Image: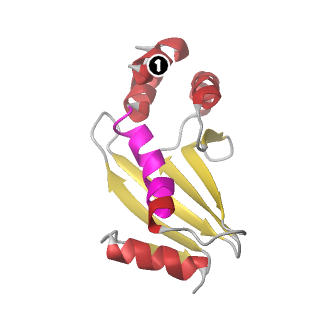
Amino acid sequence: MTIYDKLCDYLTKEQIHYKQLTDDTLCFDFTIEGKFTHLTSFLFINEDSYMVQTSLPMPLKEAGFPMVIDFFTRLNVTMEYGYFSLNKSNGLMSHIIKVDCADSFPSDAVINESIMTGIRLFGAYGVASALYYLLSGILTPAQAMDFVAR
């Protein structure tokens, strides 16, 4: 069994409806509570690793880049698993986790954690809502960080 097969089996077992975008890329959507309610997750799969990119499928305009970069930098200092990223070429705001499988095959628990971490951070931990308030001018990056921390 390959990593790709294991991930497909896991998604099917958990009833997560996914699309195959390429031979090594899967995609699925999630709905969360808050100001931004839609997330898209991508699984980029290699022979000995995979990466989970959970994104707000709403491109950020260049004017918002400095505030989001400041906020993501503050968040990333506290992150133990993965990191937040802003792709300046397309404005995509994402949480990214890479899982190295060179020494061991990923268990269902590892796959679950890698997929759910970004979703929990954007949803339950309030990163998506903090981004909304930040981009609306209601919060500064420091206040957005406090919003997520509480």
Tell whether 58 sits left or right of 34: right
Q: Main secondary structure of the magenta part?
A: helix
Magenta-colored stretch includes residue 71? no
Q: Nearer the viewer, residue 102 or 75?
A: 102
Where in the figure is residue 75, as x and y percent of width and height? 57, 27
> What residue is shown with label 1?
144
At x 56%, y 54%, the residue is: 53
Q: Is residue 29 visible?
A: yes
At x 61%, y 40%, the residue is: 83
Could you tell me the amino acid type at mark 1? Ala
Give the answer, above or below, for where 150 lies relative to 100.
above
Q: Which residues are magenta?
A: 111-125
Q: Is residue 20 visible?
A: no
Quadrant where the N terminus sits is bottom right
Q: Quadrant of residue 79?
A: top right
At x 57%, y 24%, the residue is: 71
Where in the figure is residue 84, as x and y percent of width and height? 59, 39
Q: Residues within 10 Å of mark 1 (few under 14, many from 20)?
A: many
Tell whether 57 sits left or right of 76: left
Secondary structure under the numbered disc 1 in the rendered image: helix
